[in-house]
Amino acid sequence: MPTLALLLKNGLFAFIITLLISSNSHANAPSPDTILISATKTMLRSINENRAEIKQSPDKLTSLVEKIILPHLDFIAASKLVMGKYWRRAEKEQKIKFIREFRILLLRFYSSALAEYLSGNDKDLDENLIHYFPTKIAEGETSLTVRAELRPESGKNVPIYYRVHLTKKGWKIYDVSVEGISMITTYKNNFATQFKNEGIDALIASLEEKNKEMLANNNNHSNKAN
């Protein structure tokens, strides 16, 4: 999938470490940019503190991603956008299965991408690697975009845009764009042909198979490290 490869090349690391949003109550939810700054530093600090264990086993990194990142993403909203018109056609059970497999796909894919980045970088990660621009929230506004930049030690800055909305559990991310490449649009385009030609059940089965393959690959890497 060339667009996903480009996303990885042009800033997937930034996407992974900053996919964090708070689960505060609707009424008291702080601004998304403020939360992202704090959460990003927490994630980077966790990676630095667990670097030795991460190097020995990919499972440690996967568990960090699952524990810290995934609970704060709106997978239902993201799944609706990725499926598009097929969401309305899907049965309840199909929707549940798709959300589950899409979640696992993102967990495995981004954990692997982050592990690849760390494998070539033994230095501690700078907690100020990501710069966030102030976000103004109009009264009653429930959906907005948070703008940020990955600022590496060398090379150009990478623009990142987070699409967030206010839910009953606080602000949550449902899409991210890195250098103009949207996660939602990328997956929607990649799945569209299979939805059309093979149907919803076939695509879900395909995702299940890919997730099993990625899990097996992770286990093989872990066994080799040990």
Image: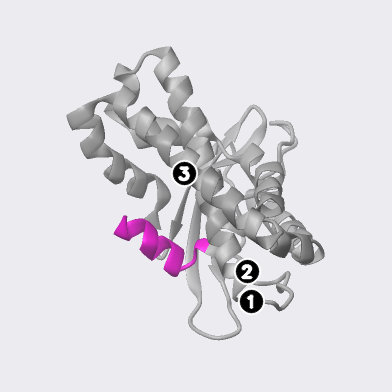
- Viewer-side residue, 208 vs 176: 208
Name the residue carrying label 1. 121
Q: Residue at x 41, y 50 (%)?
A: 183
Where residue 189 appears, x then y in whole percent? 27, 45
Name the residue carrying label 2. 118
Is residue 199 positioned above or below 139 on the image?
above
Where residue 10 appears, x then y in whole percent? 44, 69
Helix, strand or loop status at disc 3: helix
> Residue 114: which quarter of the image?
bottom right
Spatial distance from mark 2 to mark 3, Cα to Cα?
22 Å
Estimate how packed mark 1 is, as few (under 14), some (14 to 19) or many (20 or more) residues with alpha carbons within 10 Å. few
Where residue 107 appears, x then y in whole percent? 56, 45
Q: Amino acid at mark 2?
A: Leu
List the single residue furthest toward the right. Answer: 49
Q: Quadrant of the N terminus?
A: bottom left
Where residue 199 appears, x then y in whole percent? 25, 25
Name the residue carrying label 3. 213
Q: Quadrant of the C terminus?
A: bottom right
Q: Write the start and end of the magenta stretch as one range.
A: 1-12
Q: Amino acid at mark 3?
A: Glu
- Viewer-side residue, 97 vs 182: 97
Marked residue nearer the N-terminal end (2 or 3): 2
Spatial distance from mark 1 to mark 2, Cα to Cα?
5 Å
Q: Are marks 1 and 2 in contact (CB under 8 Å)?
A: yes
Helix, strand or loop status at disc 1: loop
Is residue 91 positioned above or below 197 on the image?
above
List the single residue furthest toward the bottom. Answer: 154
Q: Nearer the viewer, mark 1 or mark 3?
A: 3
Q: Nearer the viewer, mark 2 or mark 3?
A: 3
